[in-house]
Amino acid sequence: MTTGMKGLKSFQGGIHPPFDGKSLSKDIEIVQFPLPEVAYLYMSQHIGAPAKVVVAKGDVVKKGQKVGEAPGLISANVHASIAGKVTDITFKPHPISGARTQVVVIQREGEDVWAPGLDEPQDAEAMTPDGIRNLIREAGMVGLGGATFPTHVKLSPPKDKTVDAVILNGAECEPYLTCDYRLLMEKTREVIEGLRIVMKCLGCKNGYVGIEANKMDAYERVRALVGHDAHIKVELLEVKYPQGAEHQLVKAILGREFKPTQLPIEAGAVVHNVSTTYAIYEAVKHKRPLIQRVVSITGDGVERPANLLVRVGSPIEPLIKASGLKAEANKVVYGGPMMGIAQPAITDAVTIKGTGGILVMSKAGEWQSHACIRCGKCIEACPYGLNPSYLSILCESEHFQQAMEFNLMECKECGCCTYVCTSRRPIVHLIKTAKYELGRQRARAQEAQKAKEAQKAQAAAPAPVK
Amino acid sequence: MSNAQEKVVAPASGGLPTGELLVTTSPHIRGPEDIPRVMWTVVGALLPAGLVGVYFFGYYAFFIVVLSVLAAVLTEAVIQKYLLGQPVSVKDGSAVITGILLAYVLPPGVPWYIPVVGAIFAIGIVKHAFGGLGNNIWNPALAARAFLQVAYPAPINSDWRIIKESGSVLSNITGVDAITQASPLFKEFGGKTYSYVDLLTGRVPGCIGETSVIALMLGGAYLIYRGYVDWRVPVGYIGTVFVLAKLLPARIEAPWANDPIYHVLAGGLMLGAFFMATDMVTSPLTRRGLLIFGIGCGVLTTLIRFYAAYPEGVCYSILLMNTATPLIDRFTQPTLLGSASGGKK
């Protein structure tokens, strides 16, 4: 176990900005935002295969009705977040990947009532692990910390792996974001109930709750609630980004390490964040699919930062305007400042399941980048043991193969190196570009290979009769 | 954060008032440190040693420092503007540091053209011919000092001023009172031995900025506190000299031959260990590498002092270790998370 400042549990590397922006929205209670007139439901709100549309244009759907179905294991269902009519099935650029992705458009109509069979209290105590897993899978659950990995996959460990620790991730280390903190404060019982459901599903007796030391009230509240439950330990963590990333959390709490490209299961752990765990509670206890979540609207570009309960697929413009968009705001980011994705326009963007925050920044600028002066700060900050200095230089000069030798593919793009870079080098940008370029090269090579084989097959076959 | 009093108007129509949104990759915030901040802080940390130098050696020493800085800055500006067609970056402070460091390793009585030629060499050849800040292999000031040693041996090796016993500031501007030994480490017969107190304060012969151990340590400690200098370099360097000076059989006919404290306090070691060997560009990237680098500097310095013709070994040992930096980097790469505990490849 790595122990950080003041004996708090921690990890090697990482950063903490002097102003972390939490104060803007941390004390603002969650409020339900008015339902959108139109909801845009991306069929790809998760890692894995896009969901298959199971409704048709003109269909009338109820709240929570399935509109997209997972075609395989690594995928997730998508449900109507409002009751209404399917007015279009089209393609839109994805807010995270930028790729054109299928979208089901629903115009709100009628009352906000659940589809039949949903919103019924369930007896979680009596359920089997498979029963729990099915409910979660049906609910279209994905990791709501932003990575959007399908939750049921995390709950189906391979047979040769054992899970001896379930960690509830209450670190919320991304600066500015407060949705998890608000849930921990306002829905403490439900969140902890969600953790117990996950533990039951995995047959795991050891639950941990990791909370950063800047959220003492949440820590006290959880401790009071967990009380003498010997199976759940509440741990106080050093305030440091990326404390809430799976590798760092597992290291801090369990003292175990696994490679950046590996999953926590390699270390016998399963990690779920607070928003996911709350949604699991809703899905299992009340049979409510994942159609809404808490979104922090924050940053110095809005007058009144807020934590809003928002239906999935809501256009973000009303959310931001309701929070008092400032005239000098010039950057809108999905997620936090460290890993969030900047949006080209607010008029077109809608929330997805992974949207835990929308950061609106004022007078955001760009940085002049210089040659690396080899200060080594990036290496000290990298929580994954990479050499960002080398990687940035190799990627910049397009020496991608050499970059691979320096573990290019192990980079999680957490942004610590770029944050500390004295030369203001866009290290993460260079790494992302290199990965993209490599992906394209691989695709091209595969195609060439295929074409070659086809040619060979053709040559071997008897000439077709014309 | 923006001022609450600022007039803010939510736009009436859709979209943002300014029209376009800035789209960049993450992260969207940056830490407080950048090149000018680091460089100007180093300049500040170098000042105490220079002030002491000027106090003991006189105003001519100040003139040499200013000349050296001006020459360095001007050379950089001319090269960037007229030869390379780059934006002129002298405001980042790095050429100023080179100018100061070069002056600090020159004898206080050198002719005026020595710092000028040295600065042109340091900035033009050692820095910009290799690609500018970040790409140079050797510490520009030290490489220039080595160049001057070869090109102008007479003024570099013999033009030294003794400090007046009174420590008077004003009398040494023009008049050379006496030519004396170049360094407290002068190992020929008849060299004078100085007290620890004089070595600490800087009341000893030597180069302009290298004599005051206290002033140098003050600046160095501040840079360690600010995180611009990793303690492994000065500690590894000075510690190694201390240990080896005690252990190695010295071939020096002096009372301080095997006195580790004298070896640590005298000569250019403090300036080298805190301000030269710690140059980010020319030293290794990782903490492990920096420790190896510091120890290597210490070994070479002691070997040169003990067994070579020069009284001093700081300049050449750091330059040699600069040369070895890529090699050290190669063997001290960071360890990938999870690879030590047997995670699968």
Image: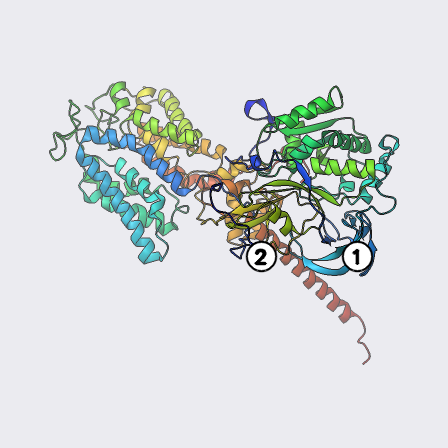
The one of A120 and B300 positioned closer to us in this rendering? A120
Q: What residue type is disc 1 on?
A: Lys
Describe residue A133's horizontal placement relative to residue A383 as left or right: right
Residue at 46 percent across and 48 percent down: it is A367
Among the 4 quarters of the image, the one containing residue B182: top left
Instruction: Give the number of the disc on residue A194.
Output: none
Q: Residue furthest bottom?
A: A466
- In the displayed structure, does residue A129 sit left or right of residue B166? right
Residue B78 vertical placement versus A454 (above, below): above
In the figure, is residue A163 to the left or right of B31? right
Q: Which residue is mark 2?
A: B13
Q: Which residue is mark 1?
A: A85
Q: Residue at x 55, y 50 (%)?
A: B10
Name the spot of residue B331 as percent of width and height, x first: 51, 38
- Chain under disc 1: A
Answer with left or right where residue A431 lies relative to residue A99: left
Quadrant of the drawing holding the C terminus of chain A: bottom right
Q: The numbered mark 2 sits on a residue in which chain?
A: B
Q: Position of residue B66 (x, y in %)?
A: 23, 40
- Locate residue A308: give its quadrant: top right
In the foreground, A96 or B186: A96
The amino acid type of the residue labelled 2 equals Ser
Image location (x, y in percent) of residue B169: 16, 28
Q: Residue at x 31, y 45 (%)?
A: B122
